[in-house]
Image: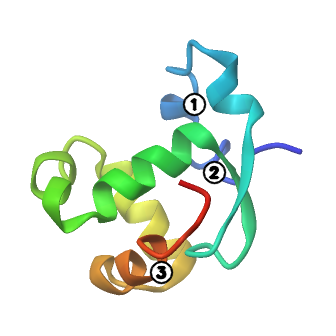
Amino acid sequence: MSCVLKKELKSQHDKIQDDRFSDTQYECPVLTGKKICLWCCLHIEGVLNPISRANLEEKYRDYVDTISDMSGLNLDAAWEICSSCRNR
């Protein structure tokens, strides 16, 4: 199974150099159970976490926009879900 964000975030997926980041798939509760790779999971957690958000929000704007569009949630609401996820 392929990461649901692979098409939307092609430029980010092209940066994956270690297959362990792309081979591991998780059901993302923010994206209502769709499968994402570990690479995207870690980046999503980084941009949603209020502590790291200020430093990463502009650098990973494509993640922010894609997650907001696909989930229909603002960053704080998405963080409430992401922060309780057991996949991390």
Instruction: Determine whether the residue tagged by mark 2 lies in a helix, strand or loop.
Output: loop
Mark 3 or 2 closer to N-term?
A: 2
Q: Work out which residue is located at the far left of the displayed protein and give it.
A: 54
Residue identifier under label 3? 81
Q: Taking 23 as reference, is 29 left or right?
A: left
Disc 1 secondary structure class: helix
x 61%, y 58%: residue: 87
Res 27 quadrant in image: bottom right
> Alpha carbon of mark 3 to alpha carbon of mark 2: how far?
18 Å
Task: Find the distance from the CA under tag 1 to the CA under tag 2.
Answer: 9 Å
**x and y, in percent, of residue 38 in the image:** 60, 41
Q: Secondary structure at mark 3?
A: helix
Q: How many marks?
A: 3
Q: Residues within 10 Å of mark 3 (few under 14, many from 20)?
A: some
At a point 68% along the width and 79% down the height, the residue shown is: 32
Residue tagged 2? 5
Up/down of 80 relative to 34, above or below: below
Q: Nearer the viewer, mark 3 or mark 2?
A: 3
Q: Residue furthest front?
A: 86
Kind of residue at badge 2: Leu
Height in image: 21 above or below 78?
A: above
User: How far across and how far down the image is residue 69, in percent?
Assistant: 48, 74
Going from the N terminus, do you reach mark 1 or mark 2 first? 2
Amino acid type shown at disc 3 = Ile
Residue labelled with disc 1: 13
39 left or right of 46?
right
Q: Nearer the viewer, mark 3 or mark 1?
A: 3
Q: Is residue 25 left or right of residue 73?
A: right
